[in-house]
Amino acid sequence: MKKLIFAFLAMVAVSCGGNAQEEKSSEKFEVTKSEEQWKQELTNAEFQVLRKASTERPFSSDLNDIKEPGTFVCAACGNELYETEHKFMSGTGWPSFDRAVEGGVAYGRDSKLGYSRDEVHCARCGGHLGHVFNDGPRETTGKRHCINGIAMDFEPKNQ
Ligand SMILES: [Zn+2]
């Protein structure tokens, strides 16, 4: 009888483990701050894009023209997001990349405009960066990460 009870308890334990794992899959970020804290730390324009998922005006970012080697990091938390070597001139007016730094970004869905788009955000603080489209350079990944320049800072390689 004792053995039976033990087997039963073991089964309960296993199913609880399963539930816990499901909870884990909902995104939790290493850097979390209240809306008030973000408001204090970011400029209003940065806050609107990073925390409210708005989109900057095309051709408004200084980062559009950057060609020198370096890393684009999250303006909110400093996480490495993109490298210049994966940047390409898309002509859209937003900094565009064919791939992200591995583990630097995470993806979600956004249906704000009435159709579904792949949203991309910082994997460390969850800050909204932009969207991913499938019309990128065919000779590489075919992806176009269309990123708000204001959501990033640029760190040149040789500094
Ligand atoms: Zn971040």
Image (cartoon, rainbow, N blue to C red):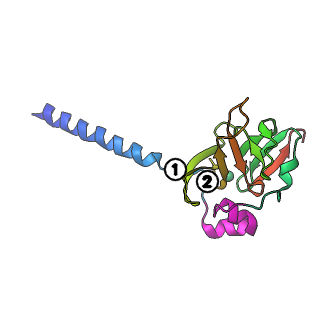
Q: Is residue 118 left or right of residue 16?
A: right
Q: Which mark is residue 126?
A: 2
Mark 1 to mark 2 CA distance (whole Å): 9 Å
Q: Label 1 neighbourhood size at 10 Å, few (<14), some (14-19), many (20+)?
A: few
User: Is 7 positioned to the left or the right of 157 in the image?
Assistant: left
Ligand 1 contact, mark 2 (Cβ < 8 Å): yes
Tell me where residue 23 appears, x and y as whole percent: 42, 49
Q: Based on the displayed image, in which of its 4 quarters is residue 45 positioned?
A: bottom right
Q: Main secondary structure of the magenta part?
A: helix
Task: Pick the residue in front: 65 or 17.
Answer: 65
Q: Amino acid at mark 1?
A: Glu
Task: Check disc 1 and report its element: helix, strand or loop.
Answer: loop
Query: Which is more toward the observer, 132 or 113?
Result: 113
Q: Quadrant of residue 82?
A: top right
In the rendered structure, the answer to whether residue 124 lies left or right of residue 84 reads: left
Q: Which residue is mark 1?
A: 27
| Magenta stretch holds residue 49 | yes
Q: Which residues are magenta?
A: 33-55
- Residue at image coords 40%, 43%: 21
- Disc on the earlier residue, 1 or 2: 1
Q: Which element type, helix, strand or loop, lies under badge 2?
A: loop
Residue at the image position 46 percent from the left and 45 percent from the top: 25
Q: Is residue 99 above or below residue 57?
A: above
